[in-house]
Image (cartoon, rainbow, N blue to C red):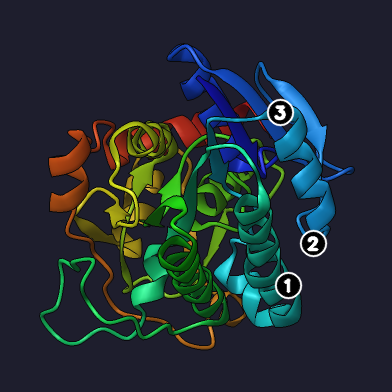
């Protein structure tokens, strides 16, 4: 089986490369010119804003399955750079869909969206089923919802083999520190090494999110590629939300340093949704997938990663 990862230079890409290699795939992955790809694969340079280049790669590689990971995936950055977020997540995705539509071979496309798409949810609607109406609450979520709806249109109109995924928060070693678990762990590691004053800066600690280890997530992506039903949308996440306060407390408990906590207004989002938690009945039923790595283990592994880098 030959797999192509679009956007393999990001955080998730390296883990997906390892997962596919471990399961006998021939792996190809793309990245931008200024990026590098970790893991054993054939690497290709690609900007998804250039549709003809996508078509050329499909024709040259002839993959059996394509995993679409390329995205501007930071909610915080989407508030600061909404145009860039829309260009990459919407226009870039349409370029890929068009290239797949025109491609003469048979290929399955796994389109990675986000649990953020649910947005402003009704009280008592968690855990969220895939049938829950979408009410995006930030720019990133809106672009991913648009990506997904466009994918559904292409799947129906052109009979393309496409599986849409709403991935909830995932974290682990190597993640950029603009994301909350990695951010807390980096700050703690720097404090332990004496490179930062013993104060950790935080944003909203009351929000509750579903956190899954990236190593579990990529296993789910592979299984959806193998067993997911074409044209369907799948939640992927632990199925149990925890507060950002719990994430912070767990990370602090792993350190012997005396650390104070300070609220930083710059870390607060323009709008934040209190609780987001998925129903994972569908993915478990169709693929057998469920999360296996605990949140506590993810935090510990991420902290140890930053300790080695600080």
Q: From the viewer's perspective, is residue 41 above or below residue 276?
A: above
Residue visible at 40% across and 73% down in the picture? 117
Eye-nearest disc, 2 or 1: 2
Give the SS element for disc 2.
Answer: loop
Q: How many marks?
A: 3
Q: From the viewer's perspective, is residue 62 above or below residue 24?
A: below
Q: Which residue is mark 1?
A: 87
Figure quadrant of residue 204? bottom left
Q: Which residue is mark 2?
A: 49
* Disc on the earlier residue, 1 or 3: 3
Asked whether, in this view, residue 134 is left or right of residue 15, the answer is left
Residue visible at 76% across and 48% down in the picture? 54
Q: From the viewer's perspective, is residue 197 above or below residue 106?
A: below
Eye-nearest disc, 1 or 3: 3
* Disc on the earlier residue, 2 or 1: 2
Mark 2 vs 1: CB contact within 8 A: yes
Figure quadrant of residue 40? top right
Q: CA distance from mark 2 to mark 3?
A: 19 Å
Residue visible at 40% across and 65% down in the picture? 156
Figure quadrant of residue 240? bottom left
Q: Which residue is mark 3?
A: 61
Percent x, y of residue 62: 66, 30
Percent x, y of residue 105: 60, 37
Instruction: Sort mark 1 into few (<14), some (14-19) or many (20+) by Cα contacts within 10 Å.
Output: some
Residue visible at 23% across and 64% down in the picture? 277
On the question of residue 189 being in view, the answer is: no
Closer-to-camera residue (54/194)? 54
Give the SS element for disc 1.
Answer: helix
Mark 1 vs 3: CB contact within 8 A: no
């Amino acid at each position: 089986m030959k797999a192509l990862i679009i956007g393999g230079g990001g955080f998730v890409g390296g883990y997906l490369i390892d997962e596919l290699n471990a399961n006998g795939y021939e792996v190809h992955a793309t990245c931008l010119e200024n990026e590098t790809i970790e893991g054993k694969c054939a690497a290709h340079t690609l900007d998804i804003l250039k549709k003809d280049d996508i078509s050329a790669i499909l024709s040259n590689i002839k993959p059996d399955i394509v995993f679409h990971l390329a995205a501007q995936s930071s909610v915080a950055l989407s508030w600061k750079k909404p145009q860039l977020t829309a260009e990459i997540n919407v226009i870039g995705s349409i370029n890929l869909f068009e290239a797949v539509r025109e491609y003469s071979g048979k290929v399955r496309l796994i389109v990675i969206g986000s649990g953020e798409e649910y947005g402003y949810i009704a009280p008592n609607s968690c855990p969220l089923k895939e049938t829950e109406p979408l009410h995006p609450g930030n720019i990133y979520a809106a672009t991913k919802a648009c990506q997904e709806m466009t994918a559904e249109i292409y799947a129906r109109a052109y009979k393309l083999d496409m599986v849409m995924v709403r991935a909830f928060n995932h974290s682990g070693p190597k993640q950029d520190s603009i994301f909350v678990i990695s951010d807390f762990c980096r700050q703690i590691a720097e404090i332990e090494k004496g490179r930062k004053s013993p104060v950790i800066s935080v944003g909203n600690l009351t929000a509750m999110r579903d956190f899954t280890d990236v190593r579990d997530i990529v296993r789910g992506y592979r299984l959806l590629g193998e067993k997911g039903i074409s044209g369907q949308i799948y939640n992927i996440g632990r199925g149990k939300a925890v507060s950002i306060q719990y994430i912070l407390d767990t990370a602090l408990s792993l350190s012997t340093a005396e650390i104070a906590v300070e609220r930083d207004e710059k870390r607060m989002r323009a709008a934040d949704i209190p609780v987001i938690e998925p129903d994972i009945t569908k993915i478990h039923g169709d693929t057998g997938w469920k999360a296996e790595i605990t949140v506590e283990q993810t935090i510990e592994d991420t902290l140890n990663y930053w300790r080695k880098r600080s």
